Amino acid sequence: MSETALPAAARPRKPRPRLGSYVLVVGLACFTVFAARQIDFRWSSFVDMWTNPLWGRFWPVPWDWVLNRRNVFDALIETFQIAIISTIVGCSLALPIGFAMSKLTSPNAPTFWFTRIVMNIVRAIPDLLWGKLLVTAIGIGAFAGTWALTIFSLAVMVKLFSETVDAADPLPLEAARAAGGRHTPAVRTAVLPEVFPAYVAYALYVFELNIRASLVLGLVGAGGIGRIVETQRSTFNFDRLLGILIIMFVIVVIIEQFSVAIRKRLV
Amino acid sequence: MIIFDDVSVTYRGGVHALKNVSLTIDDGEFVVVVGLSGAGKSTLLRALNGLVPATSGSITVDGIEVVGASAKTMREVRSRIGMIFQTFNLVNRTSVMNNVLMGRLAKVPAWKSTLGLWSAEDREQAFMAMERVGIVEKAYVRASNLSGGQQQRVGIARALAQHPKMMLADEPVAALDPVTTHQVMGDLQRINRELGITTLINLHFLDLARHYGRRLIGLRGGELVFDGDISRVDDETFRDIYGRAITPDDLLSESTGA
């Protein structure tokens, strides 16, 4: 091999970023400054915030109260029940709806657009508002919370899952069609095995979200650990509140470790 | 029997992939289709089982009209025609068994196959198809763990599980090395002879076409430019079909050094 380099002119120059990219970055920066002025943003608030005497009331955590079974544990069990039921029901419904909402596996254009529009409307309403609406509709309690989180799970799951199906390999589906298969069995045999690990991973993620969501759902009277959080907050028992939050933190970390372990086995 | 009568295929966007093609293929024939890429070889096969709808003309398979057929008729026709693909088109994340069972889709009720409830009979048929191409010991191995040649055999077994009367192979060896190429071509030839399955194969290597084909069909720019017995084919014929001189790239033995 000779070391002779070609004249510099023969090599392509690195393309420059387009003018539009600079305009976009500068524009975003200007808008951020403008928006901060509009909402009275002050750097000093980061410091002032901590001078509030509120924070002193979080400590020490009254562990004898927090670990008493009737105070927290029962509500925690309720949270798990709500999360498990809504994850299973929501994710099961999301399987066929997710397939119907993907260009690759939708049986026809009307089904595709109908599910897409309906699911966009469902997703436009956040979980807390679903909770509020359902508490009004069917009464205060865990049942309303279960409904709210089922709808929430469905909305999240369908979105994530249908996008995974969009990216799935279309060629096995062509083979299933060429063998004379009907639409549903063809999708089941040719696409489902490819996207199933992702489906399980998303379902575990949705379960995690549901455990977290139960903290805020209690605020609107939809049962679970959030009910305890709301009573303790409104009676200014911030030390108990911190205890509950620490327990939730530990639980979420444990669930995450579990789902990481399961996902590793799936791939 | 397959009859193409004045068949044209125009893709959305205006590309004329096939132009007024007429030809008849008798039961049990082994036909090789050659032509440059873009000549319409793939479209010819896909028009036959309706994966690509013909724009005009008539295609009949054992007397059943394919052009404009209902979904039900189309599935019936497809169930009689096995198809093998250049890229194998296997479901990588599942077993060879589950892949071969896809060939049984047209034979069982939709709810059963959707739930994965395959009968002992279906599994037996799948095993027999695997035995015919010598991959039965891989039945419960994941498809993605097989070599290219083994994967294409799974593709053939999947087609055989249909009990097809005809077999379409779209560049079945283009992704394989020379040794496995000859194994897979040998399998296809044996299946044609032993089971009497009418076989249509797209190839782009001329020496392969000449070695395995009995009848040769040449396509150029979507038009049928040659149709005849392989014994009548010489380098002149290939020059006509390709519209240029033969280069080493057109021969498997030359281009790979095998």
Image (tube, coloured by chain):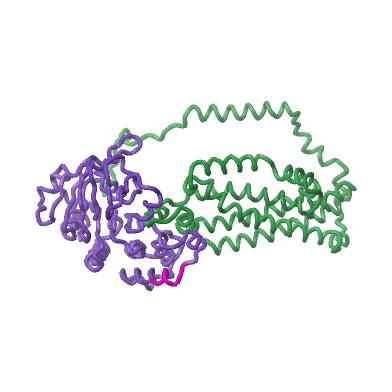
What is the quadrant of the N terminus of chain B in the image?
bottom left
Q: Nearer the viewer, residue B109 or A111?
A: B109
Q: Nearer the viewer, residue B44 or B67?
A: B67
Residue A84, image x and y in percent? 69, 59
Residue A242, image x and y in percent? 82, 53
What is the chief secondary structure element of the magenta stretch? helix
Residue at 56% x, 55% y is A199
Q: The chain shown in green is which?
A: A
What is the quadrant of the C terminus of chain B in the image?
bottom left
Residue B115, image x and y in percent? 52, 62
User: Magenta span has B120?
Assistant: yes
Residue at 23% x, 64% y is B189
Residue at 36% x, 58% y is B79
Question: Is residue B144 something that shows in the picture?
Answer: no
Region of the chain picked out in magenta, as a range = B118-124
Compared with A110, A73 (above or below) is below
Residue A81 lies in what quarter of the image? bottom right
The hue of chain B in the figure is purple
Residue A31 lies in what quarter of the image? top right
Question: Is residue A184 something that shows in the picture?
Answer: yes
